[in-house]
Image (spheres, grey):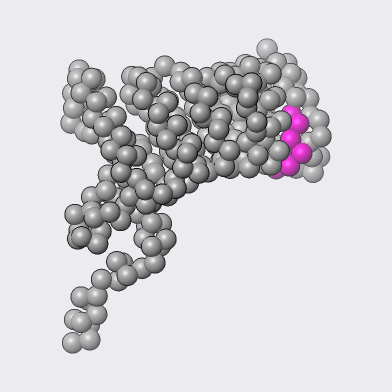
Amino acid sequence: MKVGRASTVDVISNLPRDAIDAILSYLPIKDAVRTSILSNKWRYMWVTIPYIVFDERCYPSGIPSSKKELFTLKCVNIVDQVLLQHRGSIHGFECVNYLPSCSDFDWWILFVSRQGIKQLFLEFICSDLYKLPSCFFSCRELYHLRLQGCIFNIPPAFDSFSRLQSLYLCSVVISNDEFQCLISKSPLLESLTYLGYDYTCPKINIPNLRYLFLYGSVEALCFENTPIEELGMHKVLCCLKQC
């Protein structure tokens, strides 16, 4: 009898709201949205989850590759509907782009830049390189940033990423001057991973550096005001192809 009565208690619904948000954040966004059909109490539960991930698990399946426009339309509609219904802060936003176009990303980044975004992962796989919009550089709450397949064009008004601790760049287009500007205006940076395009004599000036991984064609490295001796080679991994 005791077991029977206990089994009817809705334990999950009675958890603290931040615990429910954490649980929903671990689900694929498609499944998190589906919880809205469980009951009236759960109808809008998902709209406050602080971490949102759009990857292959949430994109539509069963659409022939010949119908790219239909696939693109459905994917864009999914992201639009989730963002438009979301309420509250978005601390983490991750989007793996399989679309042939990047035209909708500007407003998505503008939206999350106004939501206190702290962790931003953008990967462009099947599309052309994506030029980061100016609103991206207003994400001043960022502490983790991961970018793949992007083009940097840092605006003159860029102030800083004053809280950024981790930076991962893969196959990005960024000039030496912009690279120096980016890391110099990230005073709390501890981890830097830079993979892909060629760069010439980059100056690594990161006082709080704890981890460094570089891969690409480079002539030389210059460490300035960086605790390279204290790190030890097990934390500094440089796979540098000679020019």
Residue 69 in sight here: yes
Please report the residue visible at 68 percent of the width from the left and 12 percent of the height from the top.
243
60 or 74, nearer to the observer: 74
Please report the residue visible at 74 percent of the width from the left and 29 percent of the height from the top.
204
Q: With 213 as the anchor, is 110 left or right in this view?
A: left
Numbered range of the magenta stretch:
204-213
Residue 199, placed above or below residue 32: above
For residue 201, what is the image quadrant?
top right
160 or 129, nearer to the observer: 160
For residue 101, what is the image quadrant?
top left
Q: With 8 as the anchor, is 115 left or right in this view?
A: right
Q: How many labels, in total?
A: 0
**Residue extending furthest bottom?**
1
Quadrant of image for the N terminus: bottom left
Please report the residue visible at 66 percent of the width from the left and 23 percent of the height from the top.
179
Residue 52, placed above or below residue 23: above
Q: With 186 as the anchor, is 2 left or right in this view?
A: left
Query: Residue 122: x and y, percent?
Result: 46, 32
Query: Residue 94: x and y, percent?
Result: 43, 38
Residue 205, placed above or below residue 2: above
Query: Residue 8: x and y, percent?
Result: 20, 75
Please report the residue visible at 26 percent of the width from the left and 32 percent of the height from the top.
77
Q: What is the chief secondary structure element of the magenta stretch?
A: loop
Q: With 33 as the anchor, is 95 left or right in this view?
A: right
Find out whether residue 114 is within the magenta segment.
Answer: no
42 or 229, nearer to the observer: 42
Query: Residue 99: x and y, percent?
Result: 33, 24
